[in-house]
């Protein structure tokens, strides 16, 4: 009889522990998620993995991406086009229980890039000054990378004018890539912008 009593007592203890653990798990509804990126250049794609605890099949999920978009999926994703700071919030509900977690992300702007030239057509050797648009350098920490279309490239960190000389006849497509201090890049390409005519040789 004592042995049976001990066995029953042990079963009862195990049952109580399991019941307590179950009630504790239900009580500890905790919203949580991981994020693929917390900062980056626009457009920024963010993948969100739900890691909430204490949930079950009846749990409701509500995402607020901070950019006017929402989702009720368990896992989610968002794309941020405009630069700025955004707060991503996940709210989970189960009956009368609710838990919320928020994370801040930063979306950096891409640099503005544009340029003109003081001359676009002439005989070789043709000296051209490329002028960066004002909006292209009213930012800090910019790096400019030129491709002049004749096999020559040039990198600089100063605003204003950039001279280049073309030595042989051809149509040249010019591209300028600007990188800002966040590592964000913008490129503009102007096809056949510069026409270099052949040298005329006088003879008699």
Image (spheres, rainbow, N blue to C red):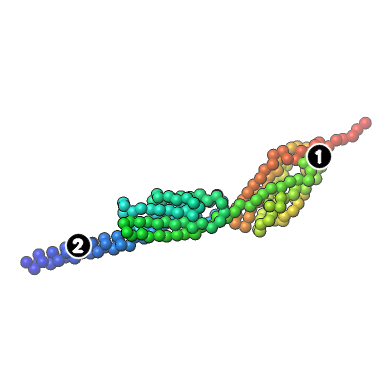
* Residue at x 36%, y 53% (from the top left corner): 60
Spot occupied by residue 2 in the image (x, y as percentages of width and height)? 8, 68
Q: Which residue is mark 2?
A: 15
In this orientation, which residue lies closer to the viewer: 199 or 86? 86
Nearest the camera: 69 or 189? 69
Hey, which quadrant is residue 198 in on the image? top right
As drawn, which residue projects farthest toward the top?
A: 204
Q: Is residue 80 left or right of residue 3?
A: right
**For this view, does 106 lie left or right of residue 130?**
left
Can I make out residue 22 in this image? yes
Q: Which residue is mark 1?
A: 122
Q: Residue 190: name its quadrant.
A: top right
Q: Residues within 10 Å of mark 2 (few under 14, many from 20)?
A: few
Residue at 37% x, 56% y: name it. Answer: 92
User: Image height check: is 24 above or below 79?
Assistant: below
Residue at the image position 47 percent from the left and 59 percent from the top:
103
Q: Earlier in the sequence, mark 2 or mark 1?
A: 2
State if disc 1 and disc 2 touch (CB < 8 Å).
no
In the image, farthest residue toward the bottom = 2
């Amino acid at each position: 009889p004592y042995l049976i009593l001990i066995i029953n007592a042990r079963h009862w203890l195990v049952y109580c522990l399991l019941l307590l653990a179950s009630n504790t798990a239900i009580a500890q509804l905790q919203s949580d998620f991981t994020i693929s990126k917390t900062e980056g250049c626009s457009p920024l794609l963010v993948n969100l993995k739900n890691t909430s605890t204490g949930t079950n099949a009846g749990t409701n999920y509500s995402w607020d991406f901070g950019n006017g978009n929402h989702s009720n999926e368990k896992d989610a994703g968002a794309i941020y086009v405009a630069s700025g700071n955004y707060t991503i919030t996940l709210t989970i509900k189960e009956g009368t229980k609710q838990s919320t977690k928020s994370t801040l992300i930063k979306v950096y702007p891409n640099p503005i890039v544009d340029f003109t030239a003081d001359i676009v057509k002439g005989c070789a050797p043709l000296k051209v000054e490329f002028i960066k648009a004002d909006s292209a350098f009213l930012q800090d920490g910019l790096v400019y990378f030129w491709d002049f279309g004749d096999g020559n490239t040039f990198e600089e960190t100063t605003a204003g004018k950039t001279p280049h000389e073309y030595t042989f006849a051809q149509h040249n497509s010019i591209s300028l890539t600007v990188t800002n201090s966040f590592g964000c890049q913008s490129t503009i390409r102007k096809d056949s912008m510069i026409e270099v005519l052949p040298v005329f040789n006088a003879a008699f």
